[in-house]
Amino acid sequence: MDKLDSMNDVQFVFGAVLVVANRMDTLLERELKEFGITAKQWFMSVVMDNLFLEPPTIKELAREMGSSHQNVKQVALKLEQKGLLTLKKDPRDARATRLHLTDQSRRFWDRTEEKGIAYTKALFKGIDPKDLSAARRALKQMIMNLSAMEQRPSVLGEKNNEEF
């Protein structure tokens, strides 16, 4: 019997999410190295391009990425140095900084799109669309649970009577 088979589903999924995230990050870093961009820089650009109709503030982007304001700002500054992003003060609120993808960024994405599609196809190869849909629902609920957990001081000290 495989060691993984002795784990209950919650234990397995918890560990597998961490392993998959680490391995995806490692492989993505390897693939993106030739373009001089990191996985975090890539992810930030993808989130900006896909989730916002207008240039987001650092705070808005941090929330969507599940990251801190400081981390997002650091990654944004690196992208700005590469000419892929500009940081501009919001004309309506001087306290807010909006992030704008540049024309150079758009050209970069056009150059790398084919490789990104190939990476995604390889990653999801052999997974039934019904399984992907179930995984989407589970991950969406996990994201909602994490958001709720962030609002509480600590979940580790609470008694939880639910069985895994």
Image: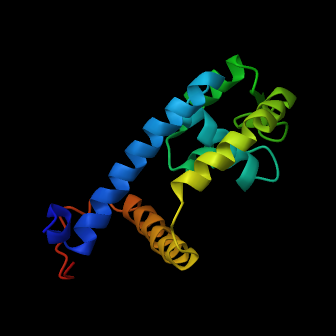
Residue furthest to the bottom: 162
Counting from the top left corner in percent of width and height, residue 42 is at: 62, 37
Horizontal side of residue 60 vs 155, given as left or right: right
Picture residue at 76% right of the left edge, 21% below the top: 83
Say which quarter of the image contains residue 100: top right
Figure check: 86 above or below 3: above
Horizontal side of residue 12 vs 84, given as left or right: left
Picture residue at 23% right of the left edge, 66% below the top: 11
Counting from the top left corner in percent of width and height, residue 98 is at: 75, 37
Counting from the top left corner in percent of width and height, residue 114 is at: 73, 43
Residue furthest to the top: 81
Q: Could you tell me which quadrant the C terminus lies in?
A: bottom left
Please name whichever residue, 42 or 99, is drawn nearer the observer in this view of the structure: 42
Please name whichever residue, 56 or 91, is drawn nearer the observer in this view of the structure: 56
Q: Could you tell me which quadrant the N terminus lies in?
A: bottom left
Say which quarter of the image contains residue 129: bottom right
Picture residue at 50% right of the left edge, 44% below the top: 67
Counting from the top left corner in percent of width and height, residue 2 is at: 16, 64
Horizontal side of residue 17 vs 115, given as left or right: left
Figure check: 39 above or below 65: above
Can see residue 70?
Answer: no
